Image (cartoon, rainbow, N blue to C red):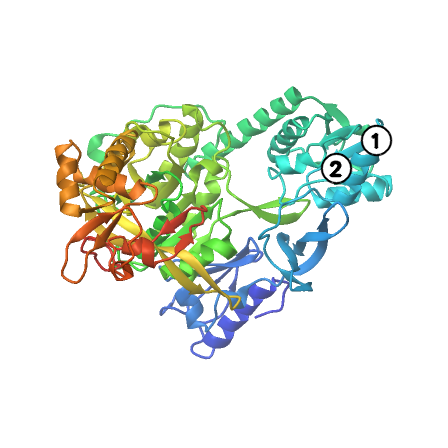
Amino acid sequence: MTAREVPRPLALFLMTAERVMLPNHHRYRVIEGVGDQYTIPCPAHDDDNPSLSVGWGDSRVILKCHAGCDSVDVLAALDLTWKDLEQPRTIVDTYRYEDEDGLLLYEVVRTDPKSFYQQRPDPRHPERRIKNMQGIKPVPYNLPDVAELVAHGRADDVIWIVEGEKDCQAMRAAYGPFTVATCNHGGAGKWTSEHSAHLAGFVGTIRIVADRDLAGYKHAIKVYDSVRDVGVEVELCLPAAGKDAADHVGDHGMDEFIPASVSALTDLKNAAEDVAKNAALTKATSSENTRNSSAPGRVVLRAAADIISRRQKFLWTDRIPLGAITLFAGRGGVGKSSFAIWLAVEAQHGRLDGDLKGERVVVLYVSVEDHWETQMKPRLIAAGADMTRFYQLSIGFTEDAETGERVPNLPEDAPLILDAIQQQTAPVLVILDPITSTIQGDDHKREIVRMVLDPLAKIAGETDAVVVGIMHFNKGAGNASDKLSGSHAYRDAARAVLLFARDDDSGEIVMSQDKGNYSREIEHSLAYELVDTVVELDDGDIGHVARVRIIGETTTTVAQIINRPLGETNEVAEWLADFMRASGGRVAATDGIEAGKQAGFTESQLTRARRKSRPPIQSVKTGMGGGWEWVSEEIDRAEEFRGNTEEVGILNTEAFATSSGEHVIKRRNRRKAEPDGVPS
């Protein structure tokens, strides 16, 4: 191979391929393409005609065998791993975030190729760093200077809010050390009311510099509204040259920023959104040969005789169709994300009962709310995921010739999701968690939701990929079909909807099919529980995470759970309290159930009321071979409690916290449980 300037990981791959394959046969030679693109014989199969495309993109090696070999198999044939091909990153700058007194809270580290991560001092070894923000609240950059000006500033003083640390440094370098500029870490959209609280009481003026792009306009408007809430004077402005404050200071003075109003920025934002949406929709819904958005519309007619009919296929038979959007919806704390991971891992290993059974599915996962290092990766370990085929999906972007990563914005990033799917040689499952956080605009408006979901549905249909969107329930009871938050267009656009709810009677979580356009009606729901699982982490520590364990089919539905009368428990509880007092705090369980039924209550109502009573009315075994009693008072005979309670899961197991913060109690399964595999 001739020497040329190529990224080190790509050079390593090509040199390894040449070294491994060249001795075997003369045809194994690297065939150069254009730029950093190459075509070589694939080492994973007998390849007479070079079929492996090798390239460089988004700071990583990209492989695609046009004969269908998996990239992992290609790497294995060369005795390489993805880790071997990681691009080495060098630290470019470290930004200190300090409290009002100058004490270091955390740091933002910027690397080349451009990326960012946060780290905090190790409380036990302050000279060391821990790469997470656990227990740390974000603060404004340059907080000591900001706090000083807030406390002692004058009416003519200015605090500048820009979009990044580099802009802050550029303004101070250009306009002098007394220039106070601040920002939040993490880029556009991450300013919060906690940042604004540090500005309360400032007697001068806050000037917000908006970056000249869609994200910048949105960010500036959000910061403006937040800062106004703390009662200080706020102004908006735009750079006179370039995209941001750093560009402006190169040739312009501090007084040359262009004043802007909220309405002006809103107009700019709307215009940028229109441009982005039109471009995204054009690319996402057009073929490679028909991407000219200026072409006039025309009627297209296809005779039904020319359309080839085919059977609808499923990732999970009668539940999740291929080539369509499926929604998971439920209240917080029911483990929707954990269930999505369970589903993904079952699909990865080809264990789901469906058309891809036995195949190795690739998973592309967008997690907006959960941190990958501390939440997602441990859950994947617990679930037994194939880490080489489970990808964090993010969007690379370029600013000032440098790159970074962000969560996808839909619909503008729909074409990039299509590209990510097309890069894979295996079936693809895309999970958007939650899908609502990827939508730019008010998702209570039908047109906004359809503008996002229609391109996604088309992408799924053209690639036979599965797209799963996770979302939340509205509060209260009502028709389960109407519980999805946001516009009803979500349910209209999805071809399948699965609902989730916790059954307080059994302690289990129930999943019911609410919509299945392409499937037969499923008679039963599915019950599962979240099991506390200990995992060994990559840093040598251990963690506790929730893992899904399938229990089996159940006749209880989500609709029944969310529509149980809110007042029934109080009514039953009042009767039960009176009954227990009249019985001296102890009664045979069979007598209690019979008396309750005579009073007009069902056994499940009595069970629910007994468990929710405070203190709980325990169901206690009277001894070896004895019956069960309801007891609402302290019992001196301790042996009656020794391992003989009906609530085994509550008394004999500890609670653990899910990622949503809800503590889940493991309960004994009262139904014959199936193994951890997939129910038939």
Q: Mark 1 points at which residue?
A: 157
- Badge 1 marks a residue whose secondary structure is loop
Q: Is residue 613 above or below residue 221?
A: below
Residue pictured at 50% horizontal, 53% vertical: 372
Q: Quadrant of residue 569?
A: top left
Q: Do the residues labelled 2 and 1 touch (CB within 8 Å)?
A: no
Residue furthest to the top: 263
Residue pictured at 45% horizontal, 23% vertical: 296
Disc 2 marks which amino acid? Ala
Sequence-wise first label, 2 or 1: 1
Q: Quick check: 395 left or right of 346? A: right
Which quadrant of the rendered structure holds the N terminus? bottom right
Pointer 1: residues within 10 angstroms few (<14), some, or many (20+)?
some
Residue 418: x %, y % from top left: 43, 44
Q: Which numbered dot is residue 245?
A: 2
Residue 284: x %, y % from top left: 44, 37
Q: Quick check: 666 left or right of 190? A: left
Near-viewer residue (5 or 542): 542
Q: Quick check: 229 left or right of 72? A: right
Residue furthest to the bottom: 23
